[in-house]
Amino acid sequence: MNKLSDDDIEKKLLRFPDWEYYENALHGEFEFENFKDCFSAMSRIAFECEALNHHPNWSNTYNVLTISLSTHDADGVTNKDFLLAEAIENIVEPDEE
Ligand SMILES: C[C@H](O)[C@H](O)[C@H]1CNC2=NC(N)=NC(=O)C2=N1
């Protein structure tokens, strides 16, 4: 999978307002009601990761989930990262488009 250019990434990010691009990766931070809701979302995301064979760098502090997406093989952001970002959006923000 080819690394996307900065311009392509910024264009694609217009559809992903919860995400920012810096340090060669997409970054998102999501807050939930409590730890249980946060960890439940993480479990669901984990299944999507396995299905896509693509995995985030992430951390969790109580009700906050912090995620970075990049493609190690390409040393940058690829379409796979956007596919996973979309899957994550569908889990954490199911009512938004
Ligand atoms: C062997 C396996 O296909 C690779 O290690 C996959 C797994 N998950 C991955 N996840 C991410 N984020 N980047 C990768 O390059 C990557 N590569």
Image: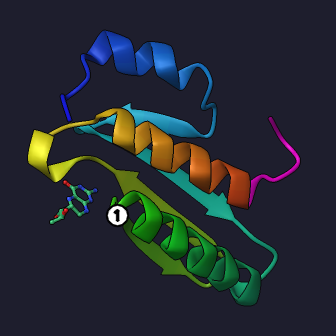
Q: Is mark 1 within 8 Å of ligand 1?
A: yes
Q: Position of residue 17 (x, y in %)?
A: 63, 31
| Above or below, 87 relative to 55 | above
| Depth check, front residue: 32 or 74 | 74
Q: Position of residue 24 (x, y in %)?
A: 23, 37
Residue 53 lies left or right of residue 46; in this view the side is left
The kind of residue tagged 1 is: His
Q: List the single residue furthest toward the right.
A: 95
- Which residue is depicted at the point 24% across and 16% down? 5
Q: How is the image coloured?
A: rainbow
Element on which disc 1 rests:
loop
The N terminus: image quadrant:
top left
- Quadrant in which residue 56 is drawn: bottom left
**What residue is at 19 percent from the left and 29 percent from the top?**
3
Determine which residue is flagged by label 1. Answer: 55
Magenta residues? 92-97
Q: Quadrant of the C terminus?
A: top right
Q: Residues within 10 Å of mark 1 (few under 14, many from 20)?
A: many
43 to the left or right of 74: right
Q: Is residue 78 above or below residue 53?
A: above
Q: Hey, which residue is sitting farthest front in the picture?
A: 51
Q: Predominant secondary structure in magenta?
A: loop
Work out which residue is located at the far bottom of the displayed protein and give it: 36
Which residue is drawn at the image coordinates 41% and 70% (left, top)? 50
Residue 39 percent across, percent down from the top left: 63, 84
Expressed as whole percent of the image width and height from the top left, the position of residue 13 reads 51, 24
Q: How many marks?
A: 1
